Image (tube, rainbow, N blue to C red):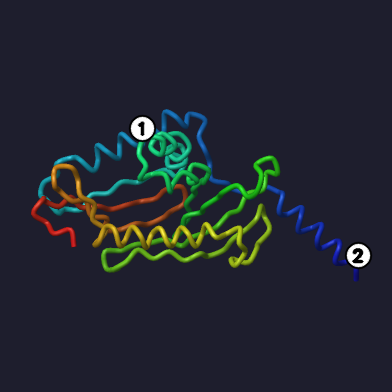
Amino acid sequence: MRAIAAGGLLAALVLAFVPPAGRPTLPADAVTRGEALEQALVAAVTKVREPAGESWAIAIDPADINAWLATRLPKWVAHDPEFAPFAAASEVRIGSEDGAIVLEAPLGPRALGLVGTVRVPLELTEADERLEASVGRARVGRLPVPLSLAAFDAAGAFREELGRLEARYPGRRFRLGDGRFIEIRAISCENGRIKIRFATLPAAASAG
């Protein structure tokens, strides 16, 4: 029995230290792609659109999000105290598959090379009142682990942050500098692509 238990423990350790297959990527040209994503998003949300209230959409490659997290987010954190709570997100890598996003983050000292992966089903339709996110599965390396492990508190924090965003921006509306509002109407995840549908509302629109 001891031999079996020892063999099982060894197998678990091996799986934990083997990098997961199909990991979220950070592109080699991360600085360029991070800047390009930020500029493209700013241009998209500030564009004057007619007729007001008509839906428009973008599709984002998760690798571009990872580039922004790794290269642009630290600069925002350094210059704007409001971004300080998000500093740790620069270590997170995001992937997407049908119906869900995949979050990967280092566990423990970086020298160990351990990574944790959490699959989060995520979808929003215009009929949904709230953006809900539940944790589907978690792994350390390639080892499936219970979601209750402390290492995956980040998954709970992710859900809590969504809740704070919902409370801070009722109706999923964000006010622009000129008084207009950007409303998030739908989110869907596909393999290698996250699609978000918005609407630009006039300044007279209520934020509630």
| Farthest-out residue, bottom | 1
- Give x and y (percent) for residue 169: 26, 57
- Give x and y (percent) for residue 121: 46, 62
Element type at mark 1: helix
Q: Which residue is mark 2?
A: 3
Q: Amino acid at mark 1?
A: Ala
Q: Which residue is mark 1?
A: 36
Element type at mark 2: helix
Query: Quadrant location of the C terminus?
Result: bottom left
Q: Amino acid at mark 2?
A: Ala
Residue sitting nearer the eye, 75 or 31 = 75
* Few, some or many residues within 10 Å of mark 2 (<14, 14–19, 20+): few
Q: Which mark is residue 164?
A: none
Of mark 2 and mark 1, the one earlier in the sequence is 2
Residue sitting nearer the eye, 2 or 157 = 157
Task: Indicate left or right for 82 with 95 as reference.
Answer: left
Residue 31 found in image quarter = top left
**With respect to residue 22, does 144 lie above or below?**
below
Residue pictured at 24% horizontal, 37% vertical: 43
Task: Indicate left or right for 24 with 53 as reference.
Answer: right
Residue pictured at 40% horizontal, 58% vertical: 161
| Farthest-out residue, left | 204
- Give x and y (percent) for residue 119: 52, 59
